[in-house]
Amino acid sequence: MAGHMAVFTGEVKTSTINRSDSDRKPCYNKTMIYGKGGKIMSNIPTPHIEAKAGDFAKTVLMPGDPLRAKYIAETYLEQVRCVSRVRGMLGYTGLYKGKELSVMGSGMGMPSIGIYSYELYNFYDVDNIIRVGSAGAILDDVNVLDVVIGMGASIVSDYPDQFDCPGHLAPLADYDLLSTAVESAKELGTPVRVGNILSEDAFYTDRPNSKDCFRKMGVLAVEMESGALYLNAARAGKRALCILTISDHIYRPEQLTSEQRQTGFGKMIEIALETARRV
């Protein structure tokens, strides 16, 4: 990585780690660092996360914006400590109503959340990641400030290609997390829309009608991260859920101001926190 230098006294070798599909662990080529006596050193900290083993709770809330992660941690958690700040991607762990939870930013897009969620699932032994973020409405009856829960994620990206699945894999949310979120929303008195969402790589596009097909198919909203998160969770045998607040409408001139983005996401965050507390 540019600007990153690791200092060690051992020997670097490239090893191929092959795991069977039965244990649901990823197959990957990894550069392993061998210390004295040939012992393989830990995968953590990583080039992207500086936390030590045990610093993250089993459940992590993951907004895109690291400053929103800071806001959630300082507003809703007690006994908060910062566990990672590499590249400004802030991560925190604390207590919510007595339960240990973590919150960490993901950055924008599937490549970014793909890296962070992969490392949390596979290196830091995180079991659940709940994405909390913004989305653009596609359907006419989805409005600004509505809360949408992604039951599944359609994908416009090459991200799924790495898994070498013939045909088209349908990335889904974990059912237990989904049902817990719906029940939490009911108890909080917050209406939610549950359905298919769209994850795509391009924020700006030369195709002005690119969402029309998804609109016809009843897709609720579009964002840029959930598809990669759901795929990584499935591959690692872990759990994921995406809870989104509508910040603008693709087909109407409606969007939140920067102040509304700061104050209007509270309902989504509360649903996510209550879901995390119960799993």
Image: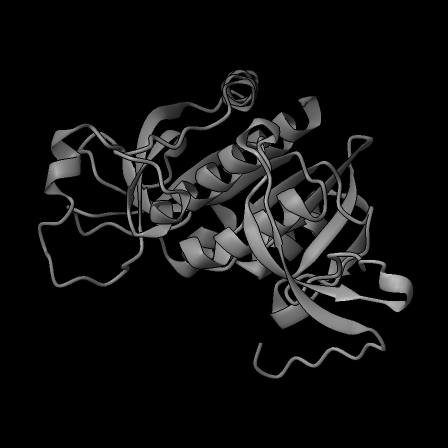
Q: Name above or below for residue 215 compared with residue 6.
A: above
Q: Name above or below for residue 151 compared with residue 30.
A: above
Image-quadrant location for residue 78: top right
In the current view of this chain or complex, which residue is farthest to the right?
Answer: 37
Number of marks drawn: 0
Image-quadrant location for residue 257: bottom left
Question: What x and y, as percent, mark residue 159?
Answer: 36, 50
Q: Is residue 152 visible?
A: yes
Towards the viewer: 234 or 85: 234
Q: Residue at x 58, y 31 (%)?
A: 237
* Quarter of the C terminus within the rendering: top right
Question: What x and y, as percent, mark residue 37?
Answer: 91, 64
Towards the viewer: 33 or 234: 33
Q: Residue at x 72, y 72 (%)?
A: 12
Towards the viewer: 79 or 84: 84
Question: What x and y, as percent, mark residue 45?
Answer: 75, 61
